[in-house]
Amino acid sequence: MPVIDTQRHDDAFTVVAEFAAPVERVWQLWEDPRKVERWWGPPGYPARFVRHDFTVPGKSIYYMASEDGTPASADGTDATSYAAWSFVSIQAPTALEIDNGFSDEAGEPVGDYPWNRFSVRLEPTVSGTRMTVRTSFETAEELEQMLGLGMLDGFLAALTQTDAILAERT
Amino acid sequence: MVVDTLSDIEVDRIFQALADATRRDIVRRVIEREQNVSDLAERYAMSFAAVQKHVAVLQRSGLVAKRRHGREQLVRPLVGTIERARELLDEYEALWRGRIDRMDTILGEAEEEGA
């Protein structure tokens, strides 16, 4: 299993993973938007990156899509929910800091939700790469917000459950 | 939302309460064994009043409660609240475990292509 350790701090969560691939290849998972799309969003609802300016200062703008490729909305309305990454620092191919939060189509923050910062560090090991991702949050609300970004407010999960229930009935 | 059994304010209070090492230690100790504030205070290099204050913060957050046992007041853990705080972090951990599994899959594919 690639995850070797997780740590819960007062105001942060750290996950450490080891991959059997060189640092440059793991870096590509962050740099190449077509690759990011395949791992960032939850299964069945890939993130679609409409912009990925992998530079400082630069932004990535994405939305979650359902399996047929149509945008999914966090609030159950037809409006597409966008989110953005804002690159704080990039030191290829070993270190990266990103601010992440809900945004408008242009990547500007929207709503009252705070943005969260995560730092990524890649180190070569004998067999590949060790990746450490540390996410900072100041309050439980921020942690919830990050869960919301990952799962789109539980809406998609609820939708999936509805599908399962409907499938059972037929 | 993720939290459906506790309000945001309540959850915030839990995290603020747990943001202190002494308070985390108090929670850990009362999970092991219910005890009074004097017993708790013996373990820390701080005054009884200071420990009392930490217990009060934990009480307000719903992580512990006091119950009367004969002539003494015992601090006991409120398991439901502690579980909820843990669940929230569990969900976040699961999110990242999923992401890392997907990353690993992509790296595996790329290797096959290159071979």
Image: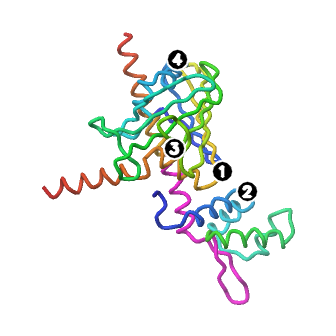
Label 3, label 1: how many angstroms apart (C-alpha)? 17 Å
Tag 3 and tag 1 share a subunit: yes
| Residue of label 2 | B21
* Badge 3 vs badge 2, beta-carbon distance below 8 Å: no
Question: In the rendered structure, which amino acid carries the disc numbered 1?
Answer: Glu
Label 2, label 1: how many angstroms apart (C-alpha)? 16 Å
Tag 1 and tag 4 share a subunit: yes
Tag 4 and tag 3 share a subunit: yes
| Residue farthest along the bottom direction in this orientation | B70
Callout 3: SS: strand
Question: In the rendered structure, which amino acid carries the disc numbered 4?
Answer: Pro
| Residue farthest along the top direction in this orientation | B115
Left or right of B12 on screen, residue A2 = left
Dot in front, 2 or 1: 1
Question: In the rendered structure, which amino acid carries the disc numbered 2?
Answer: Ala
| Residue of label 4 | A22
Disc 2 sits on a residue from what chain?
B
Tag 3 and tag 2 share a subunit: no
Task: Identify the residue shown where x is 45% and y is 40%.
Answer: A82
Disc 4 sits on a residue from what chain?
A
| Residue of label 3 | A102
Residue A7, by quadrant, is top right
Bin the neighbour count of mark 3 within 10 Å (Cα to Cα): few under 14, some 14-19, many 20 and up: many
Callout 2: SS: helix
